[in-house]
Image: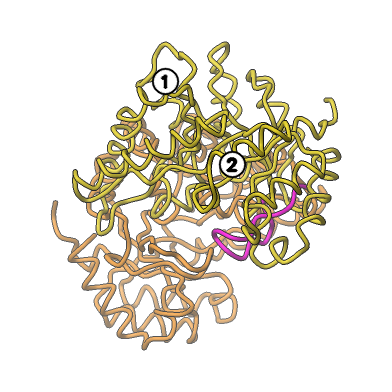
Chain colours: A orange, B yellow
Amino acid sequence: MDSLQLTRCSINTATLGHREPIDVSIDRIAKAGFGGLAPWRHEVEAADVSKIAKQIRALDLKVTGYCRSTYFPASTREQRLANVQSNVRALNDAAELGAKCFVMVVGGLPEGSRDLSAARMQVQDGIAALLQEARNLAVPLAIEPLHPMYAGERSVVNTIDQAQAIARELDPHNDGFLGFAVDVYHCWWDPQLEGALTSIGNENRILAYHVSDWLAPTTDLLLDRGMMGDGVIDLKRFRQSVENAGYAGMVEVEIFSRDNWWNLPPDLVLQTCAERLQSVC
Amino acid sequence: MDSLQLTRCSINTATLGHREPIDVSIDRIAKAGFGGLAPWRHEVEAADVSKIAKQIRALDLKVTGYCRSTYFPASTREQRLANVQSNVRALNDAAELGAKCFVMVVGGLPEGSRDLSAARMQVQDGIAALLQEARNLAVPLAIEPLHPMYAGERSVVNTIDQAQAIARELDPHNDGFLGFAVDVYHCWWDPQLEGALTSIGNENRILAYHVSDWLAPTTDLLLDRGMMGDGVIDLKRFRQSVENAGYAGMVEVEIFSRDNWWNLPPDLVLQTCAERLQSVC
């Protein structure tokens, strides 16, 4: 398998720990030679969206995803509608940024609920409500299945199979605006993963591919992701599977690491990402 | 659905935090009115197995499972054989204790390995090597799928579907000595769970049913399980699914809770388990 070129690689700004304004991060990422980035809403909304979009275009960077959706499930219908509206506003920003997709972290169980099936149905309804707006704005929606350890609070969509079933039901003709993001951290353990990726055949709905590594041991459920090569995931094999399934897009690094990488100089983090992307991914 | 009778309920001794010798725990469990228990090897091996077996019989307690297998995967063939031999010794103790099953926590990736498929194959080979001995001793092997967050270090078997596939391949005629343990903590999130349990029809391989609860938030990957009713799992619905699939055995409580229940008086923990089993499970 070919070694990755940095121009095919993207940095999710969470990897830098959100320690600097977004325009500073963008300059660092471009200077380090990466071909793209994936910014977060709270960073972009704290700045001027048009200005950020202009900076990104001037540096010839791709936006591999805009992070992330407001959670869909809620206890009341009013709140669920408000969540969809919040996502419509973010979609407009995603369009202005020229994002390849809007990353959908769908949300967990509503406060006080134990009804997982109902929450999953609310997610599906929320995505359905957003899809036409995504088509209008030409920003694909990428459902990101999250690791099952996040089913309670962050995402009731936990496998690629599940994301694919939702996409097929809501968008049977696959017109390009509903698919999913594959993140190795969330999916690496899944015994049905190869099958799920293979079975799609010509129906490629992979809109983004995120890398990091699973540390053994992992000390925190959220903020202890590893740098590629420091954990137990066979990243080359994983990329092969994703590419065999038809994905030809960029490889995005997304590392939440409160006690390690977020304490190191941003340029050192970027340099390490660059090295590892080219050696172990 | 019927409320649970305590005589149908069992206490996994980990729930008490392994703070007292096993014979003391057994007396407490019997006195609290439970119909069974599931002891751990390190407790039993620290005592006299025959004496413990005699105490359990005298108190008319069932042993819902013997915890747990030595992990199968290893870097060398010698170590893998040694792991199987360790399990054969434990199976003999399980037989002496009259255990309903030997709980198989199968192990994660061997040190330094990133080959998940190979580890899964090693697990299957290890179970195959143990199965005849299980038949000889009349102790069923219960593969326990562990939550995907344990795939790196504790178990490369992570779903009921996966456990069932292994059981079907190694024991196609289902003669009663190879099945699986269903633990709500490990499986509650699985979108394919209902299907996996339903599809087995008359082929009931559920050998044990473990309850606790998933706390939101969860603060530790291993030692922050919740008491039934304190988390987000719909336990009555879960038991209904398991019983619909043909399970008519006991309900075992297994709670690892370093910062909460393991600090409370054992009799209070047992009393709380009794109340919750009868109200929310």
Provide the major secondary structure of the magenta segment: loop
Q: Quadrant of the C terminus of chain A?
A: bottom left
Chain to which mark 1 belongs = B
What's the CA distance linking mark 1 and mark 2? 24 Å
**B21, B204: nearer the viewer:** B21
Q: Quadrant of residue B263?
A: bottom right
The three-letter code of the residue at mark 1 reads Arg
Q: Which mark is residue B110?
A: none
Residue range (magenta): B214-228
Disc 1 is placed on an element classified as helix
- Mark 1 and mark 2 on one chain: yes
Instruction: Name the residue located 85 percent from the left edge and 30 percent from the top edge.
Output: B3
The three-letter code of the residue at mark 2 reads Lys
Instruction: Name the residue carrying label 2.
Output: B51
The mark closer to the camera, 1 or 2, is 2
Q: Which mark is residue B135?
A: 1
Q: Quadrant of residue A230?
A: bottom left
Instruction: Name the residue located 36 percent from the left edge and 88 percent from the top edge.
Output: A265
Circle 1 crowding by C-alpha within 10 Å: few under 14, some 14–19, many from 20: some
Horizontal relation, residue B150 to residue B213: left or right: left
Please say if the residues under marks 1 and 2 sit with CB atoms less than 8 Å apart: no
The percent coordinates of residue A18 (x first, y second) are 50, 80
